[in-house]
Amino acid sequence: MANVSVSKLVKAFGTATVLKGIDIDVRDGEFLSLVGPSGCGKSTLLRMIAGLEQISGGEIAIEGKVVNNLAAKDRDIAMVFQNYALYPHMTVRENMSFALEMRGQSKSDMGKSIAAAAGVLGLDSLLDRYPRQLSGGQQQRVAMGRAIVRNPKVFLFDEPLSNLDAKLRVQMRAEIKDLHARLKATMIYVTHDQLEAMTMADRIVVMRNGVVEQIGSPLELYDRPANAFVGSFIGSPS
Ligand code: ADP
Ligand code: MG
């Protein structure tokens, strides 16, 4: 677990400023959802927390330590993407062990971490398959397994369920919430689906056009939206 503090965070691509001073304090062990229309800066914010984008201004701190200049691999963070980003030429087991090898973990420790993650996600019988031999839901589980084996303090999810059908999406929401309860990790979960955020999150951050419009519990946003934009966004069908 860890708290993540984002202060006055700015991101510019050339002349376009896409994050315009973001302030968010993510609590230890919290499940925080980021929502907002396409292009508002959700993925950019997540990538900056992960260390995959340079910071143009402001600060990101994890457990009170500023990480602005800390490389992605040295942050205690794992990210799960919408497109899974599995290595196609590696088996499920190799996909999961790769990140551990990079960090110099011993073979026996690696075996234990992989067995534990596979058990949690129901991947035991799939460890020797290649990604192309898996369904979409199974591939997404492998992507989560790859994050879990590293035992990070913070998980970042970028629309992880968008490519799944509606029924599987509902099932995977429950699995992710179950993981959150078991791992007691801090999770930041981007979705463009406000219903998903409403059902999963402790608190929701509503973004628009590079700024935070409101942060609150699902009930607070529903009962007391800060402005018409939040009201219509939270109230609209997904
Ligand atoms: P979201 O995830 O909310 O849909 P993004 O964070 O992907 O939004 O994008 C926010 C804005 O930043 C968009 O206008 C997008 O075009 C722009 N953007 C994202 N990445 C880059 C990049 N590497 N170079 C230039 N512009 C980018
Ligand atoms: Mg995005």
Image (cartoon, grey):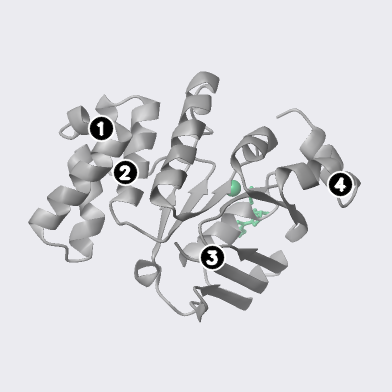
In-front residue for pair 11/202: 202
Q: Secondary structure at mark 2?
A: helix
Q: Say which amino acid is labelled 4.
A: Arg
Earlier in the chain: of badge 4 and badge 2, it is 2
CA gap, disc 2 to disc 1? 9 Å
**Viewer-closest of 130 and 126:** 126
Of mark 2 and mark 1, the one earlier in the sequence is: 1
Quarter of the rendered image showing ligand 1: bottom right
Read off the residue under disc 4: 224
Report the label total.
4
Amino acid type at mark 2: Gly
> Is label 4 in contact with label 1 (beta carbons under 8 Å)?
no
Query: What is the spatial separation of the Cα atoms under label 3 and label 2, in whole angstroms?
Result: 22 Å
Circle 2/circle 1 CB separation < 8 Å:
yes
Name the image quarter holding residue 15: bottom right
Which mark's residue is nearer the viewer, 4 or 1? 4
Q: Quadrant of residue 105?
A: bottom left
The image shows residue 177 at horizontal and vertical percentages of 49, 39
Q: Tell which of 28 and 106 is nearer to you.
A: 28
Please give the name of the residue rendered at 55% of the width and 58% of the height, measured from the top-left corner: 46
Q: What is the spatial separation of the Cα atoms under label 1 and label 3, in whole angstroms? A: 30 Å
The residue to which callout 2 is attached is: 145
Quadrant holding the C terminus: top right
Q: What residue is at 28 percent from the left and 31 percent from the top?
A: 122
Q: Which residue is mark 3?
A: 48
Sooner in the amino-acid sequence: mark 3 or mark 4: 3
Q: Residue at x 16, y 49 (%)?
A: 112
Relative placement, left or right, of 85 versus 191 is left
